Image: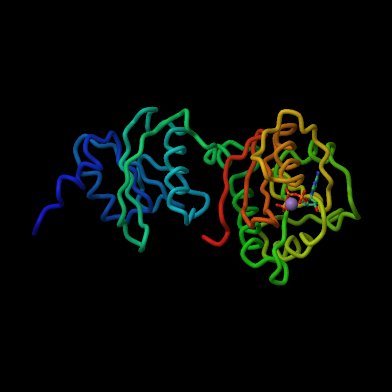
């Protein structure tokens, strides 16, 4: 059997830690037999019982997003250190690990995507459930037509104080939660009309059709985005909510926290 050329082996030469994305048990076992290399597992669940584990709240079908999330998670959880050289091994084309890349854990280059899930007021599963609705809405649109939507998640009392109703609130007396399949159908139906959905820390749908009136001062959103995105960014500066937005014009999903754009993804890749 021939050995891989040094040129390829150089990719992981001298790394401080090996970050495995959704490894099989056998793969993980072999990795932990390596001397001098820390092994970190990143996956939706810790099926291999890894000591150093970072939970993925979403599959992140875009591999760059997935690796970014894993590395930021590993840094935030203190399982790797700023400046560490990391070898990342992940499945790209199939279910088994087939791709190796190298990156450096860099505190100063964090996008904030891990922080969005792990350190928001609301439960990570609530944020994940909202992403799922928004991604599905982005894929299918409303009766095949592109649709926009804005979800403000967490710190709902304060968000309600900084907004006003555009229409009657269909969720006024209901106690329904995002993630419930029937509620997700309702959310998609109501997204035809203007305004934002407000969701509590625990995932309760507090209101639809809210017009947000945050102070936009100091909100720095990328050029070319309009009032929906401006309102989304600004409300997360004024409150401890996060905002998840589907753009009607470019079809992308964006998330804002503390006034900053922290994640941008294309629903078609999911
Ligand atoms: N302050 C606000 N609060 C809630 N919803 C808003 C607010 N401002 C705008 N919207 C919603 O965003 C919709 C689109 O507005 P606009 O085109 O300016 O935003 P945008 O950022 O360009 O979004 P898109 O990319 O979807 O076009 C409006 O029709 C309205 O439903
Ligand atoms: Mn627009």
Colouring: rainbow
Q: Quadrant of residue 243?
A: top right
Residue 87, relative to residue 268: is it above or below?
Answer: above
Residue found at x 66% / y 33%? 258
Residue found at x 57% / y 48%? 264
Q: In this view, does 243 lie to the left or right of 1?
A: right
190 or 234, which is in the foreground? 234
Q: Quadrant of residue 70?
A: top left
Question: Picture coordinates of residue 173 (x, y %)?
Answer: 86, 54
Q: Is residue 70 left or right of residue 189?
A: left
Q: Is residue 221 visible?
A: yes
Question: In the displayed image of the protein, which residue is found farthest to the right?
Answer: 168
Question: Picture coordinates of residue 91 (x, y %)?
Answer: 35, 57
Q: Is residue 42 left or right of residue 155?
A: left
189 or 45, which is in the foreground? 189
Residue found at x 34% / y 43%? 19
Q: Which quarter of the rendered picture does the N terminus lie within?
A: bottom left
Question: Picture coordinates of residue 238 (x, y %)?
Answer: 75, 32
10 or 84, which is in the foreground? 10
Number of marks: 0
Q: Quadrant of residue 158?
A: top right
Q: Can residue 270 be seen in this view?
A: no
Residue 85, relative to residue 167: is it above or below?
Answer: above
Question: In the displayed image of the protein, which residue is found farthest to the left?
Answer: 1
Q: Is residue 159 left or right of residue 153?
A: right
Question: Picture coordinates of residue 178 (x, y %)?
Answer: 69, 56
Residue 8, relative to residue 136: is it above or below?
Answer: above
Residue found at x 52% / y 40%? 114
């Amino acid at each position: 059997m021939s050995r891989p050329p040094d040129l390829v082996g150089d990719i992981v030469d001298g790394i401080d830690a090996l970050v495995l994305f959704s490894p099989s048990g056998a793969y993980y076992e072999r990795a932990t037999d390596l001397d001098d290399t820390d092994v970190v597992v990143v996956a939706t669940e810790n099926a291999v019982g890894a000591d150093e584990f970072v939970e993925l709240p979403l599959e992140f079908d875009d591999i760059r997003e997935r690796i970014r999330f894993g590395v930021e998670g590993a840094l935030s959880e203190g399982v790797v250190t700023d400046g560490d050289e990391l070898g990342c091994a992940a499945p790209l084309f199939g279910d088994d690990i087939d791709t190796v890349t190298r990156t450096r854990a860099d505190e100063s280059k964090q996008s904030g995507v891990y922080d969005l899930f792990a350190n928001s007021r609301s439960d990570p599963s609530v944020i994940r459930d909202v992403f799922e609705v928004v991604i599905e809405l982005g894929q299918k649109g409303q009766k095949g037509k592109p649709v926009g939507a804005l979800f403000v998640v967490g710190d709902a009392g304060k968000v309600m104080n900084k907004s006003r109703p555009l229409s009657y609130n269909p969720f006024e007396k209901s106690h329904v939660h995002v993630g419930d399949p029937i509620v997700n159908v309702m959310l998609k139906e109501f997204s035809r009309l203007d305004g934002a959905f407000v969701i509590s820390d625990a995932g309760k749908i507090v209101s639809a059709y809210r017009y947000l009136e945050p102070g936009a001062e100091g909100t720095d959103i990328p050029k070319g985005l309009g009032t929906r995105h401006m309102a989304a960014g600004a409300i997360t500066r004024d409150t401890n909510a996060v905002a998840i937005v589907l753009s009607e014009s470019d079809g992308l999903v964006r998330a804002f926290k503390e006034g900053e754009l922290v994640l941008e993804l294309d629903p078609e890749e999911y």
